[in-house]
Image (cartoon, grey):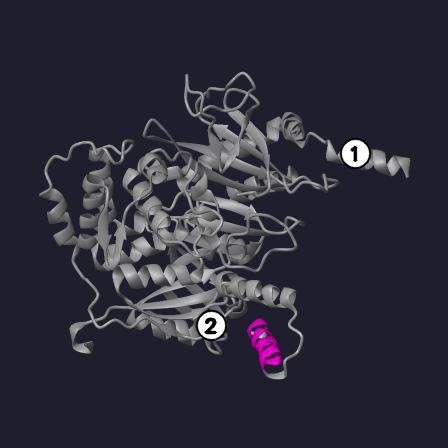
């Protein structure tokens, strides 16, 4: 904001008061503004709402399983040489039947895509199944407002990721996460846009808060009320009350600081930045201790924390609700 | 001044990796006992333990059930800790014993880690040790990692663990390549304990 004001002040001084134009300062300010617009991650501090007139596509688990059972034999895809059809189909069926077991893999940056998977598997498993089969057979597919044309690197890598725990034996999940990461780009991916070996564990796969909300809005057409940002924690006076209220009416995705949630080292100077997406499942409070149940890494976790700790780790709250006909 | 430069150079060139191996050799008996005890207790109730502070007083206990994972923090010896163990049918005495052994060798984290060989699920015991005292200030890799496999593993000529027999690809454990101590035990150093 300061940079923008400076820029306009500088231009005004040149135009109105005919002051000697400092060309280098002008260019510097222009670069600063470009940097500001593209790189500064403070987005949507206040609630932002995606509003589309159409409805959220919905389906049931039974519809998805019936669809998968009627597919018949699928030949080996030429688009995805390392993904065997039998394992691929079994993986999709398992995801539809046990959506909570979808696993982002050990040491990967796929947590946002697995949180996204929770949403689609909960409310539109048929859409997920159709998309997966289309992209496997045809090499491209459409979901929501987005047409996916996966890059060559991703097509080669799917089915080949190893040493990631259960993700090793889940070729459909590998394909799904890689395709999502390949298609959606945020400012974190600016300097690492093309997949390379190991990309799943670094900036290529990273997701900033706005990118996650954009993914949910464009692909699943939920109404998203988001509060928070990548750098600044949202100011929510009654955090417990806010989350509990949102939980009653939709799916709540939390953007949290993982190094505090899961302590992995004893470094004193920790970056207070969020890197992890979790799905809030349940919330209760007693004696000023919040018991929180959330979903990540393929399972539900229940733990207790103080409201202060929760406030410390929380950088974003996305409340996703279904758009229905009567709202149009 | 010259001594300081010498110390600086020695620290910078310190091959900390082999120290992890020496640490295992020095404490082999107790580390093997920790692995064995943990495996026995894990079969009864799947769980993982982490010490959350440098003084080894506070622990984070993760109890894994079919539907949910519970994470709680306790002070060792606290009544709440014992109540939780009773609730989840854990052998209180054996777990306390395990924690004492962990504390004795500065073992900060123990869990069971899944890995896959030819689509088959296997499990290894993953132990992280936080050595106290002087560590190389120019590295963030400060945890000795030990992995205990239940079957003999394959290694390349440099002693790095391979993905499987007759394969050239090195297996990564928690993002790190691990090296041979013996056929079933490997080591590395890492910047994180889990």
Asked whether, in this view, residue A197 is left or right of residue A72, the answer is right
In the rendered structure, find residue A45 and report the number of the disc placed on it: 2
Question: Which residue is identified by label 1?
Answer: B9
The residue shown at (51%, 60%) is A39
- Assess disc 2: are there few (<14), some (14-19) or many (≥20) residues with their C-alpha within 10 Å of its C-alpha: some
Q: Secondary structure at mark 1?
A: helix
- Residue A20 lies, with reference to residue A184, above or below; the image says below
Q: Which residues are magenta?
A: A3-15
- List x then y, in percent, for residue A245: 35, 75
| Residue A270 drawn at (x, y percent) | 61, 55
Quarter of the image containing the N terminus of chain A? bottom right
Question: Looking at this view, is A191 or B130 the one in front?
Answer: A191
Is disc 2 on the same chain as disc 1? no
Q: Position of residue B92 (x, y in %)?
A: 50, 46
Residue at the spot 15% in from the left edge and 51% down from the top edge: A64
Residue B117 rendering spot, x and y as whole percentages: 37, 27
Q: Secondary structure at mark 2?
A: loop
């Amino acid at each position: 904001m300061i940079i923008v004001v400076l820029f306009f002040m500088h231009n005004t001084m040149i135009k109105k008061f005919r002051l000697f134009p400092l060309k280098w300062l002008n260019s510097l300010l222009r670069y600063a503004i470009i940097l500001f617009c593209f790189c500064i991650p403070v987005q949507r501090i206040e609630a932002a709402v995606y509003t589309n007139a159409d409805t959220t596509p919905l389906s049931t688990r039974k519809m998805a399983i019936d669809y998968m059972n009627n597919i018949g034999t699928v030949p080996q895809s030429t688009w995805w040489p390392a993904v065997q059809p039998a394992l691929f189909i079994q993986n999709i069926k398992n995801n539809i039947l046990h959506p909570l077991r979808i696993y982002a893999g050990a040491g990967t940056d796929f947590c946002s895509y697995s949180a996204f998977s929770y949403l689609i598997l909960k409310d539109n498993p048929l859409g997920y199944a159709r998309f997966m089969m289309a992209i496997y057979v045809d090499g491209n597919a459409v979901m929501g407002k987005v047409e996916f044309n996966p890059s060559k690197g991703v097509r080669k890598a799917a089915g080949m990721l190893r040493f990631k725990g259960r993700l090793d034996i889940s070729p459909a999940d590998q394909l799904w996460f890689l395709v999502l990461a390949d298609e959606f780009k945020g400012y974190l991916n600016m300097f690492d846009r093309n997949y390379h070996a190991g990309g799943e564990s670094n900036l290529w796969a990273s997701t900033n808060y706005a990118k996650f909300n954009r993914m949910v809005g464009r692909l699943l057409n939920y109404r998203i009320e988001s509060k928070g940002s990548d750098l600044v924690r949202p100011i929510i006076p009654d955090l417990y009350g806010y989350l509990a209220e949102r939980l009653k009416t939709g799916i709540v995705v939390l953007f949290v600081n993982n190094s505090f949630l899961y302590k992995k080292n004893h470094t004193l100077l920790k970056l207070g930045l969020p890197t992890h997406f979790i799905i809030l499942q349940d919330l209760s409070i007693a004696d000023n201790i919040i018991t929180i149940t959330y979903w990540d890494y393929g399972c539900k976790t229940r733990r207790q924390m103080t409201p202060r700790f929760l406030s410390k780790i929380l950088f974003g709250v996305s409340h996703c609700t279904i758009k229905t006909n009567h709202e149009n | 001044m010259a001594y300081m430069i010498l110390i600086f150079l020695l620290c910078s060139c310190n091959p900390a990796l082999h120290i992890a191996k020496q640490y295992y050799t020095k404490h082999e008996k107790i580390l093997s006992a920790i692995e064995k005890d943990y495996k026995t207790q894990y079969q009864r109730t799947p769980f993982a333990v982490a010490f959350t502070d440098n003084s080894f007083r506070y622990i984070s206990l993760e109890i894994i059930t079919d539907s949910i994972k519970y994470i709680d923090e306790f002070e060792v010896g606290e009544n709440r800790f014992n109540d939780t163990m009773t609730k989840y049918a854990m052998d209180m005495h054996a777990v306390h014993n395990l924690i004492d052994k962990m504390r004795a060798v500065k073992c900060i984290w123990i869990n069971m880690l899944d890995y896959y060989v030819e689509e088959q699920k296997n499990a290894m015991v993953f132990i992280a040790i936080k050595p106290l005292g002087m560590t190389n200030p120019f590295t963030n890799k400060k945890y000795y990692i030990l992995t205990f496999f239940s079957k003999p593993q394959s290694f390349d000529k440099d002693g790095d663990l391979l993905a499987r027999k007759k394969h050239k690809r090195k297996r990564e454990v928690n993002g790190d390549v691990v090296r041979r101590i013996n056929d079933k035990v490997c080591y590395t150093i890492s910047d994180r304990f889990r």
